Amino acid sequence: MYMGTIITVKAYGKNADKAADKVFKRISELEEILTVNDTGSEIDDLNDMAGIVEVKLSSDSLYVLNKAKEYAELSEGAFDVTIGPLVKAWNIGTDNPRVPLKDEIDELLKLVDFRDLKIDNANHTAYLARRGQMVDLGGIAKGYAGDEAIKVLKENGIESALVNLGGNVVVLGSKPDGNLWTVGIQNPREAAGKYLGTISVRDKAVVSSGDYERYFMKDGVRYHHILDPRTGYPADSGLISTTIIADSAIDADALSTSVFVLGLENGMKLVESLDGVEAVFVTEDKKVYVTEGLKDIFIFYQEDSKDFTYVEER
Ligand code: AMP
Ligand code: MG
């Protein structure tokens, strides 16, 4: 268990076992830096010093924070890593989640604004402008870990590998037999490992966000872990899962969370505006949509996904 999830590394070729060990070492190192679950991580320092003073950061933290700001701007705030105070209030994915009072949510919402995250790249520091503000990298850190895993594998001479970080998949090269890697897209209303369909790729990251990953039910309502920074409540955009296919996992991770909040129409618009990025969207009325570039690559499993409809024409 690393980063709150199960991680598997399938690496092939000479040195594969040694390379995989190094991947796990690198991922646990990243976890120590980026987590907000342990005290003493760099990101904890950043949060503890909010409104007080800037903190010195490693190039790993700086890189992730810069990417986070880039996607906050690109998504016009749908993706916002200063969502921390609200993530903490809801506590979704822990043993004691709760529905905060509306007043509490409105109060905490005032603390959410990515513009208050000031990054000084020249001096390797960052600063949160106001007391009580908190960064939470849950929507992007696993993506970075995926990219770093591939980097470690390459440095160790591996040319064929698949890394799975709790359903966020990154593949290196093609399969050892030369065929493309086949990656399943989780059916958001079935058990883990039941797929809506598959895509076949090489050298890509395939990252999903969904209301099925972390959630709790109360009075028949599903409260999931992707919060809308405009409302402070779980995003209610009409989507139940989004998957992004991109060259890098950090981009795919930030984008999958972004488009989940943006919804089908705006999310589709955003993805179609980006080069080399494709997506699968699943709506709450159980329709499946893909971007133009996936039409020949996505294979829908109608047999296993009877109540879902694949909408090929828009
Ligand atoms: P993901 O599974 O990558 O979509 O990320 C979801 C996680 O990102 C949540 O568990 C929170 O830690 C964090 N998060 C929730 N809402 C947002 C948001 N609107 N922007 C950025 N991070 C978020
Ligand atoms: Mg994400």
Image (tube, rainbow, N blue to C red):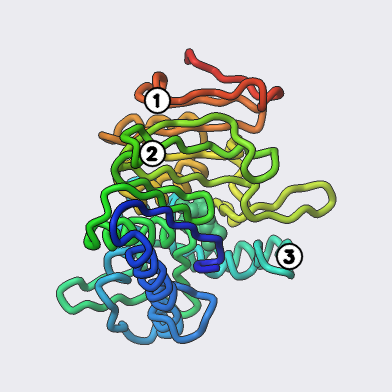
Which is nearer the N-term, disc 3 or disc 2? 3
> Horizontal and vertical percent for residue 256?
45, 45
Residue located 38% across and 57% down the image: 146
Tag 1 residue: 294
Which is nearer the N-term, disc 3 or disc 1? 3
> Horizontal and vertical percent for residue 221?
77, 47
How crowded pointer 1 is (Cα within 10 Å; few <14, some 14-19, many 20+) is rated as: some
Which amino acid type is marked by label 1? Answer: Leu
Which amino acid type is marked by label 3? Answer: Arg
Q: Which label is found at residue 269?
A: none
Tag 2 residue: 245
Describe the element under mark 2 as helix, strand or loop. Answer: strand
Tag 3 residue: 98
> Which is nearer the eye, 183 or 86?
183
> Which is nearer the eye, 106 or 292?
292
Pointers 2 and 1 in contact (C-beta within 8 Å): yes
Q: CA distance from mark 3 to mark 2?
A: 33 Å
Residue 229 shows up from this direction: no
Q: CA distance from mark 2 to mark 1?
A: 9 Å
> Horizontal and vertical percent for residue 92?
66, 62
Q: Nearer the viewer, mark 3 or mark 1?
A: 1
> Horizontal and vertical percent for residue 245?
38, 38
Q: Quadrant of residue 40?
A: bottom left
